[in-house]
Amino acid sequence: MSAEILVFYCLQDNIGALVHDPATGACAAIDAPEEGPILRALDETGWRLSDILVTHRHGDHVGAIGPLKRRFGARVVAPAKAGSAVPAVDEAVGEGDTVRVGGLAAAVWETPGHCADHVTYWFADDRAVFAGDTLFTLGCGRVMEAGPGTMWTSLTRLAGLPDEARVYSGHDYVLANARFALAADPENAALKERAAEAERVKNENRFLVPSTIAAEKATNPFLRAGEPALARSVGRQGASAAEVFAALREWKNRF
Ligand SMILES: [Zn+2]
């Protein structure tokens, strides 16, 4: 049986996610931004929290671990590289590990760049990837603890997932991301359509998560750093994709 996945807002613009295995009843929260919305989601679904899978150590992703662990005794899985910055860790994971949620399995990929300890959880059988603050719908995370080349390597890896893979990210920044994407890639027809969809969806108080790898490869300027149009936008014709990525990220920081 395949995973059931629910996404919902937490805090200002974080996205909470629950992954439920109907066969065993196991249920994982991907990160723990805020207790209230996670409890409401559990209440609505009747699922019981068994695990918390942490993508990285930032406060807006780990703040509710303590109360959720006290309430449910959930197992906390977190990047080994985060060390003691994530509270109450039961299992520290890194590149190549497999995490099980009941009968579901996720491969752990280290995807540094946004921060040094960042990991991504790839549920291959369910074609679902939890990319935390590495890849967003129409954007990517700020590069805070590595050079842009490291982030580019992490993003390239995600872009290599199957086209139909569903991308669950840690924040909803889609309108701001769409404005930047349109500035960086103004002739992209698929992007124009997607930006209009983002506006529509926002007006209905929904968000464009999950996205898909195919949609991101077609519209996300950061995944399109290898395209000549993006190189032109940053005045770096002929530069490597990694260099164009670095220039795009720098531009977005000031945008
Ligand atoms: Zn973060």
Image (cartoon, rainbow, N blue to C red):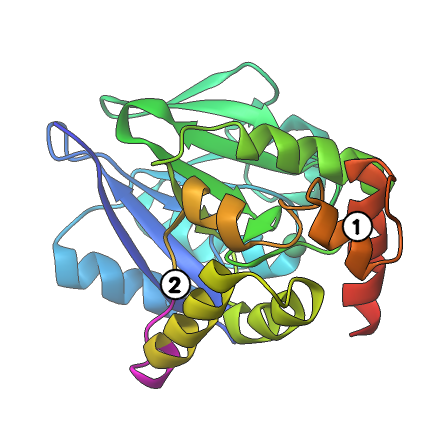
Q: Amino acid at mark 2?
A: Leu
Instruction: Determine whether 22 is above or below 208 in the image.
Output: above
Q: Earlier in the sequence, mark 1 or mark 2?
A: 2
**Horizontal arrangement in the rendering, residue 232 relative to residue 94 (left or right):** right
Category of crowding for the residue at label 2, using alpha-carbon neighbours closer than 10 angstroms: few (below 14), some (14–19), many (at least 20): many
**Does 205 appear in magenta?**
yes
| Residue where numbered disc 1 is placed | 231
Category of crowding for the residue at label 1, using alpha-carbon neighbours closer than 10 angstroms: few (below 14), some (14–19), many (at least 20): many
Q: How would you classify the magenta stretch by its main secondary structure? A: loop
Tell me where residue 47 appears, x and y as whole percent.
17, 48
Residue labelled 1 has its Cβ within 8 Å of some atom of ligand 1? no
Instruction: Determine whether 240 is above or below 61 in the image.
Output: above
Instruction: Determine whether 89 is above or below 201 in the image.
Output: above
Tell me where residue 228 appears, x and y as whole percent.
73, 46
Instruction: Determine whether 93 is above or below 214 in the image.
Output: above
Q: Nearer the viewer, mark 1 or mark 2?
A: 1
Looking at the picture, tell me which residue is in the foreground, 242 or 122. 242
Tell me where residue 156 appears, x and y as whole percent.
64, 32
Residue at 61% x, 19% y is 95
Quadrant containing the N terminus is top left
* Magenta highlight range: 202-207
Residue at 12% x, 54% y is 46
